[in-house]
Image (cartoon, rainbow, N blue to C red):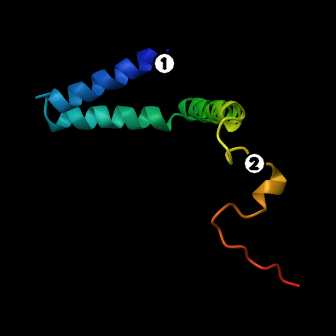
Amino acid sequence: MKYRATFIAGAALGYVLGTKAGRERYEQIKRASRRLTENPTVQETAGLIRAQAGEIAGTARSKVTETVGDRIPGLRRSNDEANTPRHGQPQTPSPN
């Protein structure tokens, strides 16, 4: 399904850019694409895809940090370490 949508979008873009049908046909395609993107079902599906992509990215980030963090000093930091200054950064005095 992903490849079909990509193909259709590419074909439509190629047609619009390469057509000699004129401004009227261009406006017709533009209106149709706007109606499609404003469709509530399409918007809902896009929202679900965005949410899933965010979850996948978070999982990938965690796995990379776990895998590479052991090999690169300073990459993996716990909550306690996150509050301490890193090398080369000035320490700010705590207000008392």
Residue 26 on image: x %, y %: 22, 35
Amino acid bearing label 1? Lys
Give the label on residue 2, or none.
Answer: 1
Q: Nearer the viewer, residue 86 or 35?
A: 86
Q: Nearer the viewer, residue 34 or 16?
A: 16
Q: Is residue 5 left or right of residue 43?
A: left
Give the label on residue 21, or none.
Answer: none
Residue projecting furthest to the left? 20
Q: Secondary structure at mark 2?
A: loop
Q: Is residue 39 left or right of residue 75?
A: left
Give the label on residue 77, or none.
Answer: 2
Q: Residue at x 69, y 61 (%)?
A: 86
Residue 43 on image: x %, y %: 56, 35
Q: Residue at x 42, y 15 (%)?
A: 4
Q: Nearer the viewer, mark 1 or mark 2?
A: 2
The picture quadrant where one finds residue 71 is top right
Q: Label 1 to label 2, Cα distance in Å?
A: 37 Å
The picture quadrant where one finds residue 94 is bottom right
Amino acid bearing label 2? Arg
Q: Residue at x 67, y 45 (%)?
A: 75
Q: Is residue 30 left or right of residue 44?
A: left
Q: Nearer the viewer, residue 90 or 1?
A: 90
Identify the mark nearer the N-term, 1 or 2.
1
Q: Is residue 2 left or right of residue 34?
A: right
